[in-house]
Amino acid sequence: MQRVAIDAVARESGKHGKLGTLRRQGFIPAVVYGHGMVPMSVAVPVRAFERVRRTTGESAIVELQFEGGKAITTVVQEYQKNPIRDTYTHVDFLSISLDEPLTSRIPIRPIGTAIGLKEGGVLEHSLYELDVQALPLDIPEYLEVDVSDLGLKHSIHVADLKLGDKIKVLTNEMATVFSVVAPAVEEAPPVPEEGVAVEGAVPATGTAPAAGAAPAAVPAEAAAKTVSKK
């Protein structure tokens, strides 16, 4: 995991009005908890946090640095965003130790071109993240999987991935990550044979119904006129 630093300030747990003031001043209200510490209310600069998210993605070790040289090693546990403005409204930081295993999820990316595509197959990406456990600095930002040798109707499973002895994989080893499958073919509707009546079809004007078929229904108005002629 990449290691980055963000300046942070301690804040009082306040009402919504104080949180709104913080946001207008360019800060995101946040809280730090975990690893035997009492939860601590903090705030981090919006621009610094957005820059970290753009450059490191979902997984990064974030050093929260305070005045006086105090620092807390964390990871982003959860965050909230305004769905309309697409802005961060709150962040939860989880305090961690670099000497203790951490459970995390890492993205999976394909590299190469599967040979099965030349045979008319389609590459299916079934698993996008892998659950792992390792020391924080041993967890990669993402995992690249070479799909070049993947032929038609062949698959790569979690058990086939190579991550080394320092990383424990928690995802089911039988789960499929990538596979090359035959493209789906839509079947055309069956064409009725000539002379065979199709259920629900109305005979054309001037044609006789097929043998054994029930006579066409006579409209009520026409039936009434027929009766009146007698």
Image (cartoon, rainbow, N blue to C red):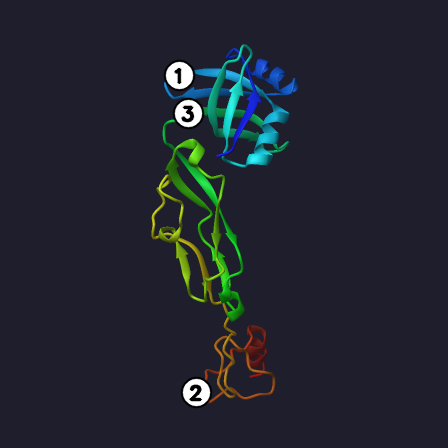
Q: CA distance from mark 2 to mark 3?
A: 82 Å
Q: Amino acid at mark 1?
A: Met
Q: Earlier in the sequence, mark 3 or mark 1?
A: 1
Reading the image, the residue beneath label 1 is 37
Reading the image, the residue beneath label 3 is 96
Between label 2 and label 3, give the one nearer the viewer: 3
Point 44% across, 50% down: residue: 127
Mark 2 surroundings within 10 Å by alpha-carbon count, few (fewer than 14), some (14 through 19), many (20 or more): few
Q: Position of residue 119 (x, y in %)?
A: 51, 70
In the image, 68 versus 19, the foreground residue is: 68
Q: Is residue 223 above or below residue 122?
A: below
Instruction: Tell me, for residue 212, which label it has, or none.
Output: 2
Q: Amino acid at mark 3?
A: Ile
Point 37% across, 40% down: residue: 167
Q: How many marks?
A: 3
Point 55% across, 80% down: residue: 227
